[in-house]
Amino acid sequence: MATGTVGNAIARRGSVGLEGRDVSYVERTIPLIWPVLRAWFRPEIRGLDQIPPAGPVLLVGNHSGGNVAPDTLVFTAAFVRRFGARRPFFQLAHQLVVAAPWLGLLRRYGTVTATPENARDALRSGAAVLVYPGGDWEAHRPVWQGHMTDFHGRHGFIRLALETGAPLVPVVAIGGQETALFLTRGERLVRALDLHRRLRLDVLPISIALPWGLDIGDVFGHLPLPAKITIEVLEPIDVAARFGTDVDAAYDAVTACMQRTLDRLAAERRWPVLG
């Protein structure tokens, strides 16, 4: 099913966001963006052939680098270069990222609000969906937790794979957390300001990042340092066949597998930023 058809079908069913992906825009711009990403982040992408060549697939990634999310930028460009812009592909993001006017271009690449409805509708329409269960909690972890997978106990991606039957493909990235110096998630500020209830925020991070110096909230993003980004795609997992309906066992196995891979990738790096 063409992406435009997917978007129209989703829009008619009342979901929000999936209709914004612009195939022609993606086709025109990825060849221009990729040389910039390649020069700045020196990406190394491994295992793209592990992703099924067609049909629905749930891509589950660890998340780094704050609201700029260099791992998402690099993987999205690599996915399009491998499978073409016409393969439906959506990236789930926090509602504030999707709604920000200055990030409107992301919607044209398929970035949509991270809701169960959007994820289910996209997978049932045959799309590839990239989800970061750790979300803002993981992306803004302190620098001394840089090589840690932290999904914050969120099991929704396992239930999504069971409900839709889509193969789950882990995507492990390293380097993003070296693009800024994250000092704290700011959990106490979140509680004091009641931001979880008001804005669904779990963090109000404090970091040292360009061009702001001391950056509180990462609201306007930042200029990422040119850290080398390495991404490794692992073998697909049929969650139902392997774990039945044991959500906890599936969660533990997937996160453990991703952490082992992240540990291995970390052992390969000799220097921060340089890789």
Image (cartoon, rainbow, N blue to C red):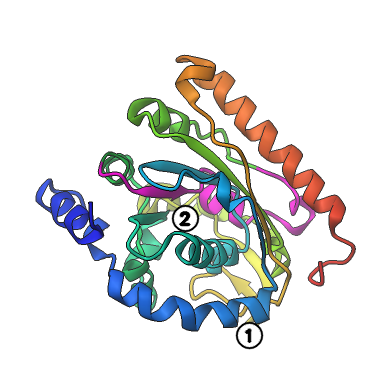
Marking on residue 211: 1
Q: Nearer the viewer, mark 2 or mark 1?
A: 1
Asked whether residue 251 appears in the rendered view, the answer is yes
Residue type, mark 1 in image = Pro
- Above or below, 127 against 111 in this view is above
Residue 129 covered by magenta stretch: yes
* Quadrant in which residue 234 is drawn: top right
Q: Label 1 crowding class (10 Å Cα cut-off): few <14, some 14-19, many 20+? A: few
Horizontal and vertical percent position of residue 146: 74, 54
Q: Label 2 crowding class (10 Å Cα cut-off): few <14, some 14-19, many 20+? A: few
Horizontal and vertical percent position of residue 195: 44, 53
Look at the image and give the residue range highlighted in magenta.
Answer: 125-149
210 displayed left or right of 160: right
The residue at the point 57 percent across, 27 percent down is: 251
- Above or below, 233 against 28 in this view is above
Horizontal and vertical percent position of residue 268: 85, 55
Question: Which is more toward the observer, 144 or 258?
Answer: 258
* Quadrant in which residue 86 is drawn: bottom left
Marking on residue 193: 2
